[in-house]
Each structure stands twice: as structure tokens, then as C-alpha cells.
Amino acid sequence: MKNYFSIVKFIIPTFLLISFLTISGFLILQWLLIIEYDILDIDEELWRQILPFIFPYIPLIIWLRPRLRVIFDNRSYYKSSYSFLFLAGFTISISLIFFQAYLKSITEKLTELTSIEDIDKFNRTRYYSLKYLTLDTTKCSSYSELRREGKYSYQMKFYFTCPIEIDTLKKSSEVDRHFYGVSIKENIEYLNKEEKDKLHDFFHNQILEKIGNGEITNFGYFENLPKSQEKNNFLKAIQSRNTHEKIGNEANILVLMPSRHKDTFTNELALATGSFLIGLGIILLCLIGTKFNEPELKRYTSGEKPINDSVVNELKFLVPENGHFITSILVNLNIIYFLLITFSGVYNEYLTEDELLYWGANTRNLTLAGEWWRIISCMFLHNSLMHMIPNIFALYLLSILAEPFFSRLNYLIIYLTSGLCGGLVSIWWFPEKLSFGGESGLFGLFGVLLGLLLLKEEKLKNTEYLIYISVILVLYLIFGLTGQNDSASQFGGFTSGSLIGIILYRLDKRRKTNC
């Protein structure tokens, strides 16, 4: 028990200090740069959904990770330390999201208006109350988009806008700047264009009917949408009007959505504190059974750096070298392509169907019409960050075993040919579905390893990586059965990878024997 309290004293204060500085620093930056002075003009999703899951890991890796080497033995250090860092970072991230909501509730102001004409008398605020609201239903417009959530499942997001009427005497001369907005989400199976248009019209008419009955305009409070992907979609709805009338400058357009009053955000502080305490409790449980690694403790207290730094070694994997030359290039291409899409202004949790097509998704109509480059581009296109990370991790593990058996050229041929074959099988099997993500190339590597096992390659026996690879393969197959992956491209990649891998392996082995 004494040893446990010593370890808690060694780890937890550092974790608590990192948590406090990370959360408070992040919130102060957000308040200064976004809320108070509006210095950074970036989408709200980046602050609220992406950065909270990245920001905490920087100080954790710098200050907490060196201490973990002291409490985990050398054999379990890599697995245990990564699991511990993930848990610590996730604890901070979840509580940070709730703390952001709490910050929003105590800093965002509410402006009470009699009508929309009074809005220019005050500085812009996040929340408004309107005593009188009249909509110009002759100028209503809408926009819809499909987001792929699985092989067969999609989510349709529908955005409806309608100008808020001002004084009738000013109405003819004023440009529309204030809009009422409503959004609808519907989980559906894949729809062709005609079916999508019918559903779009149904939602549009349904909202118009509810406006006429006063069902969805009878709200006391409204939220002024900040720069975000949601507001961008409402702007697309406004711009879709079939009219020659101009709309105001996008930066000056207000889209007001029905909202709960900011004072009803009462649970965010409790949720933030509670989620952090739950995470802290799990971390304390994880420390049970650990003990000091005396050599590492002496090294740490003396200020001596470890000979092998796992983070540095794994970052070196991004540098093409012997043993992973081609894989490093493939990983870098995936990351660069994702960053290119992200910094182009796409901060969505998932790319829409139109965005996927724009950035190179594979689909029968366009590919067979002459856009054959899509079979290559789709191998590096990912639907989201959470789609890309598992694929890169799988590519990393597979390459450790597969790439050393082949020359650089042959390994590249295997990966690209598997991707090509998987793309062709996908557009043959699913004529209207989109194919992307690079799983066909990954399954080509799975096929290569299966072929090497069938050839009884000695170097593949008794290695723990095969356990990880088996787990990854099973997970991919489960996702495929539930419709979350493109099983056709996976089958095409796996089959072609197995055949090509066996052929090229035998040719390489024969060439080395003759030499």
C-alpha cells in the first residue's frame, strides 16, 4: 500500500497540473481569440470538436510520459504507457468539451428585442429574444446534403431558411440580412437523385406548413449562429433561391435558430467536473499493481535521458528508410491529403457525398466516364479523422511484417494493384455507391501475409504482431458485415494481394537464389 501511495504521489500531481493548465489555458485562449475580441475567424467545430482531442496530448507526452517509464517495466512499457496516455488525454478532452459549454453559458450575452428592426441598435450577441416574429414565406429556400455513415446507411441533413420581415415601408429597399433557420436530420438508406429531390421537397413543404400553423416559430429565444459548418449550410440554402434579388454580405448575415435560453445551461459545470473525477478514478485504479522500476527511477532522478525514446522512434517511421520506405511514403500521402482537405475549410465530422466526390471518391458513373484517376485518389481519401487513424495504424502494423519480404518496387506494385482491383470490384458490385478509404490496399497486405503463411515463411511464425493483425482483420470484417466498410473493395484487394504477393515473392526469392 505504501508503494501505491508513492506512485500516486509521483504521477497524479503532474497529471492534475497538466489538466488544470491545459483546460484553463485552452478556455482563456478561446475567450480572448473567439468570444471577446473575435481575432480568429475559424469554424466553431474546430474549437469544440477537434482541438479538444488534440490539445491535451501535447503536454501529456512532454511531461507525463517520461514518468510512466518509471512505473512500468520495460516489457510492458509501450502498451501500458500508451493506454495510460490515451485514458489521461480522453479524460481531459471530455471535461474540456463540457467546460467549453459552461464558458459559453456564462459569457455569451442575451439581447432582448421587440422585433428584428431593433437588432442593429445593439452589438451582436449570441442569443436573442424576439417578442414579435414575422417571416416572408415568399422567399423561403432550402438546401440538403447526404453524409455517408455506412455502406448502406446515410444521414440526410436539411436546412431551411426564411427571411425575417422588417417594416413594410423599408421592405422594398432593404437587402435581406436576417433569416430564420431550421434544420432536420434523417437517417436513410442510399437515395438516387430523384428520390433525394422528393424527400427534399417533402421536408420543405412540411416546414412551410408548420410555419403557417405557428408550430415552429413560437419560440422566445434564438441563437445567432457563429461561423461554422452549420451556418455555411444555411448560407447555401439562402443562395439557392431562384431569384435575382441580392442577399447581404455573408459576414453580415444573421441566421437565427430556435434555441433554449443560455441560462438553461445548468449542468455543464457539473458534467465537466463529474467526467473529470470519473476519469481520475479510473486512472487511480489503473495504478494499482504498478511498482517502481528502480533503474529507470535512478535514471529519471539523475536527469539522464532514456537511450530509446518510443515517441521519437515512431515519428521516425514517417521518414522513408530501409524496412518501411514505401509504407512511410504511403502514410505521409494519406496524412497530407487529409490535411489538404481540412485546411481547405472542411471541418465536418464526416464528409458529405458531394465533398467526397469533389476530393476523388470512386463511383461507377464518373470513373467509367473517363475519370479513371478516381481509382487511385480514393485510396488516399478518408471520410473523417476517425476513419483515417485506424487505417494508418493498420498500415503501420502490416508493413512491419510485409514490406521487408519484397523489394521497394514490388511492394509498391502489390499495394497499388490491390487498391486498383478493389476499386474496380467496388464499382462493379455497387453501381451507385461511393468507394474511398484505402481498405482495398490494406486488405491486399492482409492477403500478402496469408500467402506468406501458406508458403510457410519462417519469419512470420511466433510473432505477437500476428495477434494484432488478426484482431484488426476481425474488426474490419465485423464492420463490413454491419455495412460500415466497402466489403467489395476489401474482397478485391484481398484476393489480388494474395495472388500478386505469392507471385512476386517467389520471383524475388528465385532471383536472390540465382544471385
Image (cartoon, grey):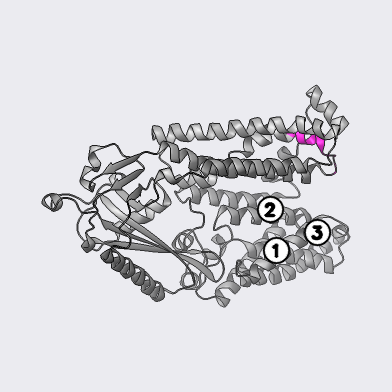
Q: Specify few, some or many for label 3: CA neighbours under 10 Å numbering under 14, 14-19, or 20 or more.
A: few
In the image, 78 versus 509, the foreground residue is: 78
Disc 1 marks a residue whose amino acid type is: Leu
Residue 139, given in percent of the width and then of the height, sits at: 23, 61
Residue 43, given in percent of the width and then of the height, sits at: 43, 45
Residue 142: quadrant of the picture: bottom left
Which residue, as the protein is rendered here, is positioned at the far top?
302
Residue 464: quadrant of the picture: bottom right
Q: Which residue is mark 1?
A: 475
Disc 3 marks a residue whose amino acid type is: Ile
Q: Earlier in the sequence, mark 2 or mark 1?
A: 2
Q: Is residue 398 above or below residue 271?
A: below
Label placed on residue 393: 2
Under circle 3, the secondary element is: helix
In the image, 325 versus 215, the foreground residue is: 215
Quadrant of the drawing holding the N terminus: top right
Q: Is residue 199 left or right of residue 81?
A: left
Quadrant of the drawing holding the C terminus: bottom right
Under circle 2, the secondary element is: helix
Residue 40, given in percent of the width and then of the height, sits at: 42, 37
Q: Which residue is mark 3?
A: 467
Give the residues drawn in magenta, as a range. Answer: 66-75
Disc 2 marks a residue whose amino acid type is: Phe
- Give the Cα distance between marks 2 and 1: 13 Å
Residue depicted at x 70% and y 72%: 495
In the image, 14 versus 498, the foreground residue is: 14
Q: Nearer the viewer, mark 2 or mark 1?
A: 1
Q: Are marks 2 and 1 in contact (CB under 8 Å)?
A: no
Whether the magenta-drawn stretch holds residue 67 is answered as yes
Q: Specify few, some or many for label 1: CA neighbours under 10 Å numbering under 14, 14-19, or 20 or more.
A: few
